[in-house]
Image: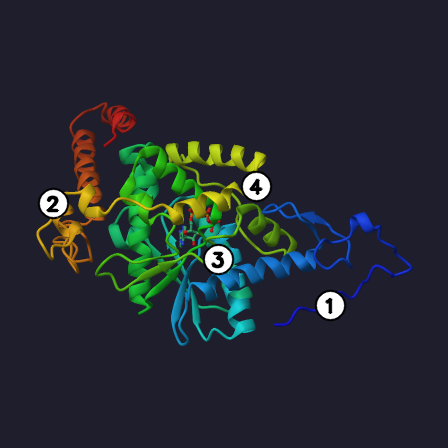
Amino acid sequence: MSWAPPSDPVNNKSKPIKISQLCELCHCRKAILKRPKNLQKICKECFYYVFETEIHNTIVTNNLFQRGERVAVGASGGKDSTVLAHIMKLLNERHDYGIDITLLSVDEGIVGYRDDSLATVKRNQKQYGLPLEIVSFKELYNWTMDEIVATAGIRNSCTYCGVFRRQSLDRGAQKLNIHHVITGHNADDMAETVLMNILRGDVARLEKSTAIITQSSGSPIKRSKPFKYSYQKEIVLYAHYKKLDYFSTECTYAPEAFRGTARELMKNLEAVRPSCIIDIIHSGENLVLKEKEQRFKKLAPGQDPLTVNSGFIDGNRCERCGYLSSNKICKACMLLEGLEKNRATIILEKDSSVDGAARVMRTLEHLSF
Ligand SMILES: Nc1ncnc2c1ncn2[C@@H]1O[C@H](COP(=O)(O)OP(=O)(O)OP(=O)(O)O)[C@@H](O)[C@H]1O
């Protein structure tokens, strides 16, 4: 789409605009917002244009989509994925990417949170005229997040949720025969991840943390992040001005503790220097890490470092569930094993004493693994 000239120029005599109030991009309309990314004062129309065009440029530069490809948008009903669904539909039509978009949601089973946000996704489905598929933890693992938290405690809830959700999105996509899932992870999320991995010294993750496309070896599903360079604040502004229908409540369970700390640090840095979000991403992209061979064991000629160092076998399948996994038993099955043991203990204790209920409550309070 070519850029449309402003319809309400400065010389509009009925409503003159002071030069100092003019949009710094079109120099015609009144600026109504300061762009969080670079503090430019711009009008609403120019904001839409630059925001959408930057995402289009990210898509084209990184060659994210192939004509005819089927793409699933990981749709949680939150602001990021709602804006993602809206923008993907818009850009697909505007620039004729020729992709086929489906909304894919995971119901983690969190009463008062995910049930409400899924209601938003169902409205979005109608608003955008896109097909929707919902897969649930209950149907895939026979556990809801509420049951997991009641059994394992709240402390590790993000670990369970993250592992099961990642696999659920893959399984949902496979069910639909879709091989590309896009998510609403944005620049703030990415900069936070880079910081977190630096602070933890997690070199293996640091290396991958700025990749726009990720794909587990052997997995048919690739993932990408079209909002890699989009600021969280701009996504919220866009959703607000476009009056998009999204769900804005935070998850009922505790956020991952260390990510929360990194987020706080990022917010403080951004307040002093807005460009630091992009700067951290660029730093991450340009980090040159030591050769894997030097970081890990010595390799025989032709040996894959990942195979040697983690027991990884390309195209491996989990011995329990048969799903693709880089280990003999996939992470989801390992977590499930711990959960099932605790469910068994709780049921046993409940049955064997008069004051069982009180004991179960005490056990639940102290359980963590
Ligand atoms: N339950 C879900 N079903 C489908 N996709 C999900 C779900 N939860 C998260 N995602 C995907 O992962 C991305 C990042 O999720 P995260 O929980 O970190 O969220 P967020 O920043 O609150 O995003 P959002 O505003 O879209 O909820 C989301 O934008 C979405 O694409």
Residue 274 marker: 4
Report whether the residue tagged 1 is closer than 8 Å to ligand 1: no
| Mark closest to the chain's N terminus, 3 or 4 | 3
Labels 3 & 1 near each other (Cβ < 8 A): no
| Figure check: 153 above or below 64 | above
Report whether the residue tagged 3 is closer than 8 Å to ligand 1: yes
| Mark closest to the chain's N terminus, 1 or 4 | 1
| Mark closest to the chain's N terminus, 3 or 2 | 3
Whole-angstrom CA distance, mark 3 to mark 1, is 34 Å
Q: Which residue is pictured at 39% across the width and 48% down the height?
A: 286
| Image spot of residue 185 (x, y percent) | 44, 51
| Image spot of residue 2 (x, y percent) | 64, 72
Residue 298 marker: 2
Whole-angstrom CA distance, mark 2 to mark 4, is 43 Å
Mark 3, mark 2: which one is toward the viewer? 2
Residue at the disc numbered 1: 5
SS at circle 4: loop
Amino acid found under the numbered disc labelled 2? Lys
Task: Please tell me how crowded label 3 is: few (under 14), some (14-19), or many (20+) other residues with Cα within 10 Å.
Answer: many
Whole-angstrom CA distance, mark 3 to mark 2, is 50 Å
Mark 3, mark 1: which one is toward the viewer? 1
| Mark closest to the chain's N terminus, 3 or 1 | 1
SS at circle 1: loop
| Image spot of residue 232 (x, y percent) | 53, 47
Amino acid found under the numbered disc labelled 3? Val
Can you see residue 112?
Answer: no
SS at circle 3: helix
Q: Which residue is pictured at 55% across the width and 43% down the height?
A: 275
Whole-angstrom CA distance, mark 1 to mark 4, is 29 Å
Residue at the disc numbered 3: 121
Asked whether, in this view, residue 199 is left or right of residue 5, the answer is left
| Figure check: 191 above or below 350 | below
